[in-house]
Image: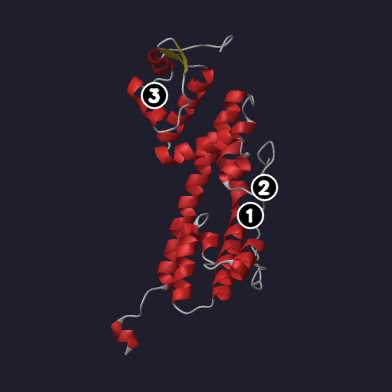
Amino acid sequence: MAGESEYTIDELARAADTTVRSVRVYHERGLLPSPDVRGRIGYYGSDHLNRLQTISRLLGRGMKLNGIRELLAAWDRGDGLADVLGVSEQQQSNDPPTAPLPVTEATPPEEPAPELPDYVKQALAASDDPMDVYRVTNPRCCDLATRLVDAGLPAQATFHLVERMRTDCDRIADRYAAEVFYVLAGQAYEQSGRTRKDRTKLETDLAIARLIATRAASELIDQAFGRRSELPSPQSAE
């Protein structure tokens, strides 16, 4: 670690404006890499300090430790920012978009059922339990698909229904993600010096923007399904 700052755990906690106990908790929970141990003393570097500052920002914006661990683990694996945030490669570039995507007023026409992905076709053809295709990667989709099949819907029709939902969700993301990400993250980055610290802040802001947008979309979809599941009052049913 020659050539860069070194900190004992006490010094690191002070530099990051946190506590020694928090540093140990983050290490135990897998959010912070191990220090370089020499003798009986652990030494931390600037990467540890940057990681602690990122954790503090994410905690301050409402993220839980489990979510932060998954996000940091993806970065450590070298996943692209698009993979970390769940954005398609077509939407992601080295810099955020310079302007929001235009919002069209036209309502897209209803489209036929999408072609099933190859992995779904293979599951239908070869697997003893086709629901395995969703069980690990999309457990909530698996729950829906399993219940539909149990209710009598054929497996192929079930997969078409779930994949239509996926297509509609992709359409929502295509329509709004760039605008939301630009306003909540990219705009500030454009006005910054685009240093390494600014890039780190951009990644944090994008992760928060994704979290906020996902929660808002989930709430709106829940409300929409709720309106369509309301039973008529007893008087109107007579």
- Choose top left, top right, bottom left or bottom right for residue 236: bottom left
- Please state, as top left, top right, bottom left or bottom right, where the C terminus lies in the image: bottom left
Ranked by sequence position, the earlier of labels 1 and 2 is 2
Front residue of 104 and 4: 4
Could one spot residue 62 in this view of the protein?
no
Q: Secondary structure at mark 3?
A: helix
- Mark 1 to mark 2 CA distance (whole Å): 8 Å
Front residue of 77 and 198: 77
Q: Looking at the picture, does residue 148 appear above or below residue 199?
A: below
Query: Residue at 53% across / 45% down in the picture?
Result: 210
> What residue does disc 2 label?
91
Q: Is residue 205 left or right of residue 233?
A: right
Front residue of 138 and 205: 138
Do the numbered discs 1 and 2 sit on residues whose CB atoms are within 8 Å?
Answer: yes
Q: Secondary structure at mark 2?
A: loop
Q: Is residue 118 left or right of residue 45?
A: right
Query: Residue at 44% across / 32% down in the picture?
Result: 30
> What residue does disc 3 label?
23
Q: Is residue 129 left or right of residue 199?
A: left
Q: Which mark is residue 174?
A: 1
Ranked by sequence position, the earlier of labels 1 and 3 is 3
Task: Report the colour scheme.
Answer: secondary structure
Q: Position of residue 177 (x, y in %)?
A: 59, 49
Indicate the amino acid at tag 1. Asp
Q: Position of residue 205 (x, y in %)?
A: 53, 36
